Image (cartoon, rainbow, N blue to C red):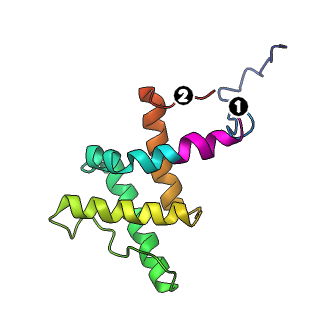
Amino acid sequence: MASLVLPANVSVVLLDIEGTTTPITFVKDVLFPYIREHLEEHLSAHWEEDECKQDVQLLKKQAEEDARQHRACRVHSVDQTVHTDEEKAIREVVDNVLWQMAADRKTTALKQLQGHMWRTAYMSGKIKGE
């Protein structure tokens, strides 16, 4: 394999994983199932952290926008601040995220949460690229 020489001012090389560094099926077969299987666990573990709160707030804004545009969404009350029942609030976020994933939505709110979960999974070794 030929080596690549980068200019001195380049400090990062960003590659798309899907079909570039891993098989195209990696996203469908590994990354998306990881979200579905670990979403509730992730939210429970990180619920009080600022990053998770920001993710949930963005999901809430998306749900509000969906309601304004009359999109059929299973959950409209995604909100950490109005619930005294953390378990119920987490369940609502899970339902919303799973609904978005099933609808193959590409919302910023969904992608941000997924990115944070994947970063955590890669860093912990739960997910490894091929």
- The reply, left or right, for residue 25 in relation to residue 125 is right
Q: Residue at x 35, y 62 (%)?
A: 93
Q: Which amino acid does label 1 sit on?
A: Thr
* Residue 28 drawn at (x, y percent): 61, 46
Q: What element carries label 1?
A: loop
Q: Which amino acid does label 2 sit on?
A: Lys
Residue under label 1: 21
Q: In this view, does 110 lie above or below 61?
A: above
Residue that protrudes farthest toward the left in the picture: 84
Please report the bounds of the magenta region as a residue range. 23-32
Q: Residue at x 85, y 14 (%)?
A: 2
Residue under label 2: 128
Q: Is residue 104 above or below residue 35?
A: below
Q: Quarter of the image for the C terminus: give it.
A: top right
Q: Which residue is drawn at 71% across and 25% down?
A: 9
* Residue 42 drawn at (x, y percent): 34, 45
**Separation (CA) of disc 1 from disc 2:** 12 Å
Q: In the picture, residue 59 is in which quadrant?
A: bottom left
Main SS, magenta region, reads helix
